[in-house]
Image: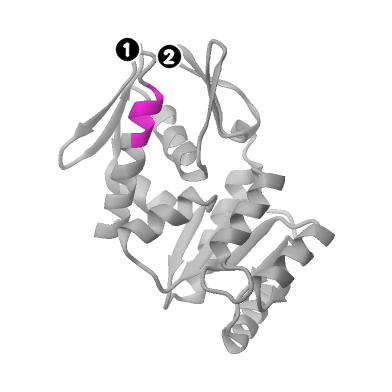
Amino acid sequence: MKKEYQLLLAEDEPSLGLILKESLESRGFKVDHCEDGEAAWKCYQAKEYDLLILDVMMPKLDGFSLAQKVRKADGYIPIIFLTAKSTTNDVVEGFEKGGNDYIKKPFSMEELIVRVKALLERKSNPIHQEWITIGKYLFHPGKQILKIEKDETYLTSKESEVLKELMMHQNELTDRSTILEKLWGSADFFNARSMDVYISKLRKKLEKDPELQILNIRGYGYKLICS
């Protein structure tokens, strides 16, 4: 991992923001901390960042709305949401708004560090920069695009990550817990429900190739069948 990644932290609780900033900087990251969404948006426009950490409930501009603005300008930068909300719908909404990860408060600093490093490592992976053939489709993980003939479909960050995991083990069983731990951070009930939602969405987006299937092997995981 390269030294001194530049992070933007948007957290409206001053004490928590200070703790997060100091902890991240002690691990070698450079961190700009903003206490509302509008200030964070101005910082984002003025400077280049490697990753964003956004609290969902913020004054002036909430984290979800800020992420949507960022996504219009940059489809690749990793975004982590921090929130006290924990229902399946909340988690799914976070990923739909452009988030790559979603951490529920309270959380440990080590958990955040692990998530940050994992996203930065994924971002630098060469596979993100290439078109990959999946059946009759072409898939670009970095651009989050599925293409079949002249039709292009844009995926959310989480859809793209789940599809990449399945694709890397196509025609093999992919353990459910392994995907959950890697992409969601834990294999709890809410994350499992969230992953089921994304699997259903991917099935619909791959239905133009009838020979492509995502099988649910009950009690074990998923298998992407690709001839």
User: What residue did someone put label 1 on?
Assistant: 211
Residue 205 part of the magenta segment: yes
- Sort mark 2 into few (<14), some (14-19) or many (20+) by Cα contacts within 10 Å: some
Q: Nearer the viewer, residue 211 or 180?
A: 211
Secondary structure mostly seen in magenta is helix
- Would you name the residue on which mark 2 appears? 135
The answer to whether residue 188 is seen in the rendering is: no
Mark 1 vs mark 2, CA separation in Å = 7 Å
Q: Earlier in the sequence, mark 1 or mark 2?
A: 2
Residue 160 seen from this side:
yes
Q: From the viewer's side, name the closer residue of 185 and 38.
A: 38
The quadrant of the image that shows the C terminus is top left
Q: Residue at x 46, y 56 (%)?
A: 94
Residue kind at label 2, given as amino acid type: Gly
The reply to whether the magenta stretch includes residue 218 is no
Looking at the image, which residue sits at the far right?
46
Q: Where is residue 145 drawn, in percent x and y? A: 56, 29
Residue plotted at (66% across, 57% down): 51
Q: Residue at x 70, y 75 (%)?
A: 33
Left or right: 83 with respect to 118? left
User: From this viewpoint, which residue is outermost toward the bottom?
Assistant: 15
In the image, is residue 217 above or below residue 47? above
**Relative image position of residue 102 (x, y in whole percent):** 46, 60
Q: Which residues are magenta?
A: 201-206
Mark 1 and mark 2 in contact? Answer it, CB < 8 Å: yes
Viewer-proximal residue, 61 or 190? 61
Name the residue: 16% across, 42% down: 219
Q: Residue 216 vs residue 122: left or right?
A: left
